[in-house]
Amino acid sequence: MRKLELNTDLVRVLKKLRLGRMIPVLPERLRQARERQMDPEDLLLLILSDETQRRERQRFALRTKVAGLSPVMVFDEWDKTASVTYDSRLLDELRTLRFVDENHHALVMGPVGVGKTMLAQALGNTAIQRDFKVKYYAADTLFKLLKASRLDDTHTAEMRRLVAVDLLIIDDFALRRLDVMETADLYELVTGRHRGGSMIITSNRTPEEWLGMLADPMLAQALVDRFSNNAYDLVIEGESYRKRQKPRLSAAGAAAATRPAE
């Protein structure tokens, strides 16, 4: 079938209106409209809906990138058959994002590999779809960023930015002991966001165990009390979620691998 060519004047006008991204798909839509004898209003709605959806996808991808989130870590990709257990009603409640509306926190706890990062990022991506401002950091990356900000005198501005977002996600917290500076930074974040912003923290340790991982006992008690008493606790237990993502030979490949050489 001969490809439908667009009128050059139409192409020029579309580009002038900054609708040039419609050009690659427009011929196919016009062909469909002629075959189906579509009403002009229906065709216009279809074409503009295509462009609206494209812009929404682009906007989501950009905001996800700025937030530091992975665009593939969404709830549609969560493997519900994984050998892990958790309170599904609590997760359903967190997915409504009422905890963000109400400036509460969420603590996602469990052993290595059970999907804590996946769920935290999926909640972050859901928040972006709801037009919340989100920022995600692995804990070590965040503390390195804040240490570096002291060197170029941007620490105050960086802390103000982190306090201002609607949802701050700190992943893999308390894998190691924090020093005095890191403990002070975490205290400032928790107190700065108390009742004024939401956090998601993922950790292999309980808040009680955090006390021994923080350098200043007084700050530790204060920040743990403020965070834990304002947080939902989602506990995930089971075998490593990553085992299901481990690459394996297909059945055909395995058979070929065991076949004797000729």
Image: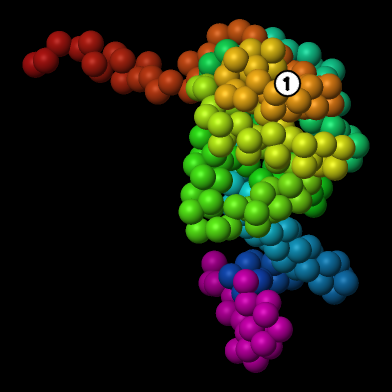
Is 88 located above or below residue 64 in the figure?
Answer: above
On the image, the x and y values in percent for residue 112 come to: 53, 16
Please name the residue shown 74% across and 47% down the image.
163
Q: Nearer the viewer, residue 12 or 208?
A: 208
On the image, the x and y values in percent for residue 204 come to: 59, 16
Does 73 sit left or right of 39 as displayed? left
On the image, the x and y values in percent for residue 183 come to: 61, 31
Q: Is residue 30 visible?
A: yes
Q: Amino acid at mark 1?
A: Gln
Q: Is residue 104 magenta?
A: no
Please name the residue shown 20% across and 12% down the image.
259
Q: Give the residue at mark 1.
A: 221
Q: Nearer the viewer, residue 257 or 223?
A: 223
User: In which image quadrant can residue 195 be found?
Assistant: top right
Please name the residue shown 29% across and 13% down the image.
255
Q: Nearer the viewer, residue 65 or 248?
A: 65
Is 190 located above or below residue 207 in the figure?
Answer: below
Is 95 located above or below residue 205 in the figure?
Answer: below
Density class for disc 1 (Cα within 10 Å; few <14, some 14-19, many ≥20) is some
Does 207 sit left or right of 262 as displayed? right
Q: Nearer the viewer, residue 44 or 49?
A: 49
Task: Please identify the residue farthest to the bottom as the structure is shown.
Answer: 9
Q: Which residues are magenta?
A: 1-21
Is 138 located above or below residue 111 in the figure?
Answer: below
Q: Is residue 123 visible?
A: no
